[in-house]
């Protein structure tokens, strides 16, 4: 599994246009074969963190080269982001826990 961590800060005043652009691109990202999931978090200081999971590096690269994503990245650099950092990670191990609900 490949995990992409995208950390960013938006320029002031672009939130509405950024959100509209993201809403038009995210459905396409979810259709890429090998896409697993993504979640977005915003910290109190304004930093946004998006975590995306892919089945393979090839799936991640397919999305990176998708023309819709290429256009969105260009727009992000030109208009939306004050700064960003991308980290591409290969999952070494995974553990999970889920408590079973007990009905009373």
Image (spheres, rainbow, N blue to C red):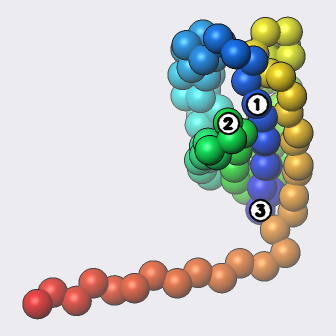
What residue is pinned by disc 2? 46
Q: Earlier in the sequence, mark 1 or mark 3?
A: 3
Residue closer to the observer: 66 or 6? 6
Q: Earlier in the sequence, mark 1 or mark 2?
A: 1
Q: Where the N terminus falls, by quadrant?
A: bottom right
Crowding near pointer 3: few (<14 within 10 Å), some, many (20+)? some
Mark 3 to mark 2 CA distance (whole Å): 28 Å
| Location of residue 36 in the rendering, given as x and y in whole percent from the top left corner | 62, 52
What residue is pinned by disc 1? 9
| Location of residue 78 in the rendering, given as x and y in whole percent from the top left corner | 85, 9
Mark 1 to mark 3 CA distance (whole Å): 26 Å
10 left or right of 62 in image: left
Q: Which residue is painted at 78% across and 79% down in the image?
A: 93
Q: Which residue is painted at 27% across and 84% down in the image?
A: 101
Q: Nearer the viewer, mark 1 or mark 3?
A: 1
Quadrant in the picture for residue 82: top right
Mark 1 to mark 2 CA distance (whole Å): 6 Å
Residue 28 visible in rendering: yes
Q: Where the C terminus falls, by quadrant?
A: bottom left
Answer above or below: position of 93 versus 30.
Answer: below
What residue is pinned by disc 3? 1
Point out which mark residue 92 bears.
none
Answer above or below: position of 11 versus 61.
Answer: above
| Location of residue 3 in the rendering, given as x and y in whole percent from the top left corner | 78, 55
Q: Nearer the viewer, mark 3 or mark 2?
A: 2
């Amino acid at each position: 599994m490949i995990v992409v961590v995208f950390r960013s800060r938006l320029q002031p005043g672009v939130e509405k246009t950024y959100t509209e652009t993201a809403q038009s691109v995210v459905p396409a990202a979810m259709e890429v074969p090998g896409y697993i999931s993504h979640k977005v978090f915003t910290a109190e200081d304004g930093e946004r963190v998006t975590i995306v999971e892919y089945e393979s590096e090839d799936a991640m690269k397919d999305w990176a080269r998708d023309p819709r994503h290429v256009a969105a990245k260009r727009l992000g650099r030109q208009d939306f982001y004050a700064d960003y950092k991308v980290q591409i990670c290969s999952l070494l191990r995974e553990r999970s826990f889920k408590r079973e609900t007990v009905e009373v």
